């Protein structure tokens, strides 16, 4: 068994989506300064790094992160290779990706994963076109993952992709790192912080390879 950590580390140097709070990690107690323990104060948005978007992110009255069905967040997952896509993933791209018809959890490996090696937020990331979002819903996929900070193209006039997915109850994992993961079948475990009424939650995501 091999475990792939597909989470990005939270640090003050990491990119955040424009408009989201910056990351601050401030030591409060330090052994090196004579304190009995090391304790830090964390400050960042709940859509920082590897995180989940529940319906409440864009759907009034939708389920919040603490209300998600945990069985959706653990189980068989398919990693698909979409590294040739340059702008937005379309329904045709997903159709050609040979995703099993019974797939419940799908993670999309794109050229985005290489963006984690660059400093600062990158606007030219690959996201989902709205027809791809509708394809995901129509196929009965319950969880979709993308390897940068949003499933929506930067500068979109309206969040149509998010609304299509989240209105249908599809859980979106954003900010995963698939650089060292080959396409194929895995077991996914992705549990967010249990934030009451949270519209998002940072998560530790792993893929288990048997």
Image (cartoon, helix red, strand yellow):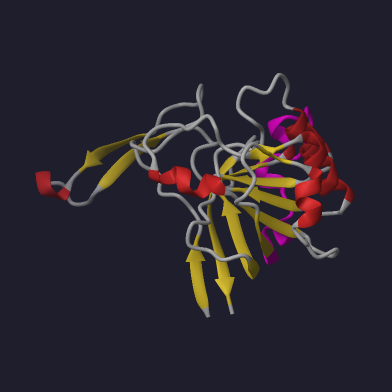
Q: Residue furthest right?
A: 138
Asked whether residue 63 is drawn in magenta, I would say yes
Which residue occupies 50% across, 66% down?
4
Question: Is residue 61 positioned above or below 202 on the image?
Answer: above
Task: Report if residue 157 lies within the magenta region.
Answer: no
Foreground: 151 or 99?
Answer: 99
Task: Determine if residue 52 is in view.
Answer: yes
Quarter assignment of residue 79: bottom right
Quadrant hosting residue 88:
top right
Q: Is residue 82 left or right of residue 140?
A: left
Number of marks in picture: 0
Residues 197 and 79: in front is 79
Determine the residue located farthest toward the top in the rendered image: 157
Q: Position of residue 167 (x, y in %)?
A: 82, 36
The range drawn in magenta is 56-77
**Residue 194 spot, x, y in % from top left:** 59, 47
Can you see residue 193? Answer: no
Horizontal side of residue 73 vs 12, given as left or right: right
Query: Which quadrant would the C terminus be assigned to in this image?
Result: bottom right
Q: Give coordinates of residue 137: x percent, y percent.
A: 84, 46
Q: Is the residue 60 above or below the residue 28 in the image?
A: above
Towards the viewer: 69 or 106: 106
- Could you tell whether 158 is left or right of 31 in the image? right
Q: Position of residue 81 (x, y in %)?
A: 64, 58
Image point (50%, 32%), residue name:
45
- Residue at 66 percent of width and 43 percent of height: 65
Q: Quadrant of residue 44?
A: top left
């Amino acid at each position: 068994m091999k475990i792939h950590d597909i989470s990005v580390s939270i640090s003050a140097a990491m990119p955040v989506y424009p408009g989201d709070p910056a990351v601050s990690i401030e030591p409060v107690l330090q052994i090196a300064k004579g304190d009995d323990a090391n304790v830090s104060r964390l400050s960042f948005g709940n859509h920082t790094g590897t995180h989940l978007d529940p319906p409440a992110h864009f759907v009034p009255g939708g389920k919040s992160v603490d209300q998600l069905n945990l069985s959706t967040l653990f189980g068989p997952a398919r990693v698909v290779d979409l590294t040739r896509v340059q702008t937005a993933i379309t329904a045709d791209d997903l159709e050609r990706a040979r995703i099993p018809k019974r797939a419940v959890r799908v993670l999309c490996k794109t050229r985005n994963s290489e963006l984690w090696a660059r400093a600062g937020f990158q606007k030219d990331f690959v996201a989902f076109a709205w027809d791809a979002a509708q394809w995901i819903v129509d196929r009965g996929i319950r969880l979709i993952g993308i390897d940068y900070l949003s499933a929506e193209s930067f500068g979109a006039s309206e969040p149509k992709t998010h609304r299509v997915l989240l209105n249908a109850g599809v859980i979106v994992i954003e900010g995963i790192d698939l650089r060292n993961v080959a396409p194929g079948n895995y077991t996914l475990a992705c549990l967010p912080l249990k934030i009451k009424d949270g519209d998002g939650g940072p998560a530790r995501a792993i893929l288990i390879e048997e």
